[in-house]
Amino acid sequence: MNNLVDTARNPWDGSWDVVVVGNGLAGSAAALFAAKRGLKVAVVGTGSQLPLSSGLFDLAGMVPGDKAYSTDPWQTVETLVASEPDHPYGKIGREAIGQSFQEFLGLLEAEGLGYQLCESNARVVTSVGTIKASYALPETMAAGATAFEKRDKTLIVGIRGLKGFQANQVAQSAAPAWPGISSVEIAPEGLGRPGDIYPEALARELDLPAGRDRLVQAIRPHLDGHKAVGLPPIFGMERSRETLVHLEDALGVPCFEIPGMPPTAAGVRLREALDRAFSRYGVATFVGGRVTTVSEGEDGFSVTATLRGEARTVFARRMILATGRFMGGGLAGDRHRVTEPLLDLYVTQPASRDLWHRCDLFHSDGHAVNRAGVTADSAMRPLDKEGNPVSQNLFVAGSILAHQDWKREKSGAGISIATAFRAAESCGV
Ligand SMILES: Cc1cc2nc3c(=O)[nH]c(=O)nc-3n(C[C@H](O)[C@H](O)[C@H](O)COP(=O)(O)OP(=O)(O)OC[C@H]3O[C@@H](n4cnc5c(N)ncnc54)[C@H](O)[C@@H]3O)c2cc1C
């Protein structure tokens, strides 16, 4: 461990090299990248929506206008940058994007959360039976991509009473693309409480070998020549690697989790692994409070948050803003324009509200408002209206950035991780 910080007495005391505002994927990644570079880091955030996430890390799935996923995410990155030179990927560059993924996945691996990089955008079946492409898969989902690629005879297993997962719906919807898929619903004896079962609770039961044995006993009679078994994301909460190995050894076929409806065990695992990494690197977290005021003086930033009704202030030499888009409050929209409410940064946006959306809500090119946001230079310093850095010590990362539409491009995690990497590097200079 390095950078250990005694936050036990009064966590708000002292000053920090970097304060990160926002505790989503971008803020968490930025805090860890900075702490790994020897900086003393504090994170202030309202909470985190990461437990709601699928756990997949997309790099670049498609170019707006495309109807199908690409098979070469790096080519897609190039196309995105060629069509939008200010795209955040254009400011980071391929080499650093690759490094950011390597370093981030290394941080997670050290916390026991393994990922597999898929250079051709692996295809996985989702909990609604659609096929989704992604660049980095949790290791518990990797066998699903192989089984789909080979169109192996695969059994999707549902669990009676489990919320948010219908095995027959997965199999029926995926069948046109995956003829070898079929489903069964089981009711493993002694697993889950009678009535509604929640994936997170079931995952915790599978952290224990006895829980896994009960699941294996219920699946075994249905194996019947299937070459792979897909399950909802329940492969343990703290021991997912051990659970995967246990199930595969006992059933004798590759097993995989299917990315599920939120909240998912995979998302909770990711959040918990990041929190363990925060402890390892001495990142102090002030989570649960909304930052209401930021002022910059000669020595750096005073960041004031309201936590349980009390205003508290953190002092730091540099700041990374990673407050996301509209949902989390990083951007706000009124009848006329999009604003960045915390620092009142300049927001790149369409000239008028009439231009925010196309008439066709589902147009494959997407909507201009989804590309609105803060424009940054290649160091990730936010720029003002004239194109000059707002401050030498202020940086920005994640989905708040302009010139990208992560939902349409399927580039969410990639933009968060790559821009966090650059912002953290800039803080260390
Ligand atoms: C439901 C869901 C599904 C996802 N699925 C995928 C997927 O399939 N593939 C993929 O690659 N990625 C996925 N992601 C991850 C997604 O890519 C990233 O969350 C996204 O890129 C945005 O990350 P961010 O950190 O920039 O913003 P956010 O995740 O929005 O985080 C910003 C945080 O800052 C907080 N905040 C805002 N203002 C303040 C303030 N004033 N003070 C304190 N805190 C503040 C917000 O409340 C929020 O918690 C998913 C995420 C979610 C939530």
Image (spheres, rainbow, N blue to C red):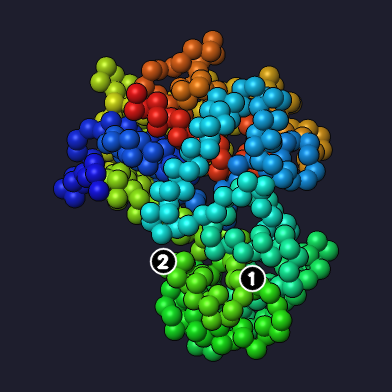
Q: Is residue 62 left or right of residue 8?
A: right
Q: Residues within 10 Å of mark 1 (few under 14, many from 20)?
A: many
User: For this rendering, which residue is in front, 99 or 176?
Assistant: 99
Counting from the top left corner in percent of width and height, residue 150 is at: 73, 63
Q: Which mark is residue 238?
A: 2
Counting from the top left corner in percent of width and height, residue 337 is at: 62, 25
Image quadrant for the C terminus?
top left
Q: Amino acid at mark 1?
A: Gly
Q: Is residue 194 visible?
A: no
The residue at the far top in this view is 386
Q: Residue at x 43, y 30 (%)?
A: 423
Q: Please give the residue where the numbered disc 1 appears in the rendered image.
A: 230
State the SS at label 1: strand
Cβ of mark 2 under 8 A from ligand 1: no
Q: Marks 1 and 2: in contact by CB < 8 Å?
A: no
What count of labels does the image hold? 2
Q: Amino acid at mark 2?
A: Glu
